[in-house]
Amino acid sequence: MAKPIYFEEHLTQAEMLEVKMKRQNLSIGILKETMPMENRVALVPASVAYLVGNNHRIVVQAGAGLSSHFQDIEYSEAGAEIAAATEEVYKCDVILKVAPPTLDEIEFFHPDQILISPLQIPLINSEYIQKLKEKRVTALAMEYMKDDDGSFPLVRIMGEMAGISAILTAANLLTATSGGTGVLLGGISGVPPAKVVILGGGVVAEYAVRTALGLGASVYVFDNNIYKLMRIQARVGQRLYTSSINPTYLDQALSDADVAIGAVHSIAGRTPVIVTEEMVSNMKAGSVIIDVSIDQGGCFATSKVTSHQKPTFEKNGVIHYCVPNIASNVPRTASIAISNMITPILAKAGSAGRIENVLLSHINLRNGVYAYKGRLTNQYLANRFGIKYTDLDLLITSTL
């Protein structure tokens, strides 16, 4: 792999001295999430301790980590300042969130501030973009930041967690105490295993397949992308029942399935409805549907959004679990994963002195920038909302 080219490698000694004189330690703010059912936190105490050890200032809103079972005292002992007032957190150079800021929260931002959070394109509108532009904020979308190998680490890790969580949740809902059929998902010697139908061929589907197979279930995978089906078979290392999404084959598979997992993803907009209400009505009474695609509307005709407080409902005798952001059900693990991804980025930004230096030398990180000091730098968003697009590379070089 080629050695990354850093901005400072192109500077003379005099220019290097000027950069070092301009370097400042970052102040990083961690907010308590206000979005319903969002239990994660952007940085965990271990990451805070690392960044404080590198002379960065961390301000944590009181109670920010409680839903992930991280106490304020843990952040304080790691070196963070605990702020009772939200306004104190917004004074920081960098604001970290695990959900996009609300329109009300954007009002607290100030020019040249850096926002690092998920973008969640299906949930935002033109007003959101306009407000960020007005505030002259530099915004980075976590899900579009690339790794050195060109992959999207946040999308993958959250997909892995969603796939695993979906199967474990289904296994619990199948029990008689949860209203299920009393079937053990993996089965035992001499007893046929439970049948699991998985819709989709992405990361969520792959890890749902891995987990279901690990428990001993019989797995059926449906997707219209033949390459994805081949990839799943290659990665799990064994032959599976795979098929394109043919209504006849799908209806047959669902009719005697114990579990159906919806893991279909739409690049932009609503997930298509793949399973009709008639297909659901043909499923066994007490069987379980886990619609991970509910974040984008759901791929089952009978799906409707539920919450962690009341996660299930019954329709046509079938138990439905349709909680958005399923990874938030295991917030501690999810928070550690997010924190591990963000911490090296913040460390690089601090050592480089300015975010422009990091963006110039790390093309994969640049991929996550969608707003830069009042300019929209994401071509897709510009086309979608009819807002002027500006090339990020030109903006960065013009400010150096």
Image (tube, rainbow, N blue to C red):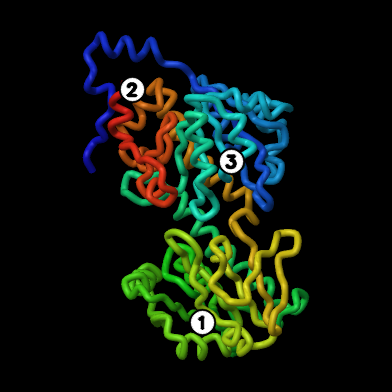
In the image, taking residue 31 as reference, residue 6 lies left or right, namely left
| Residue 328 vertical position relative to residue 212 in the rendered view, above or below | above
Which amino acid type corresponds to the residue marked 3 in the rendered image?
Pro
The reply to whether discs 1 and 2 touch (Cβ–Cβ < 8 Å) is: no
The secondary structure type at the circle numbered 1 is strand
Where's residue 397, x and y in %?
Answer: 28, 26
Q: Nearer the viewer, mark 1 or mark 2?
A: 2
Q: Residue at x 36, y 70 (%)?
A: 228
Name the residue carrying label 3. Answer: 101
Name the residue carrying label 1. Answer: 218
Report if residue 288 is visible in the image.
yes
| Residue 121 vertical position relative to residue 65 in the rendered view, above or below | below
In the image, taking residue 268 as reference, residue 128 lies left or right, namely right
Report if residue 188 is visible in the image.
no
Which amino acid type corresponds to the residue marked 1 in the rendered image?
Ser
Q: CA distance from mark 2 to mark 3?
A: 26 Å
Q: CA distance from mark 1 to mark 3?
A: 42 Å
Q: Earlier in the sequence, mark 2 or mark 3?
A: 3
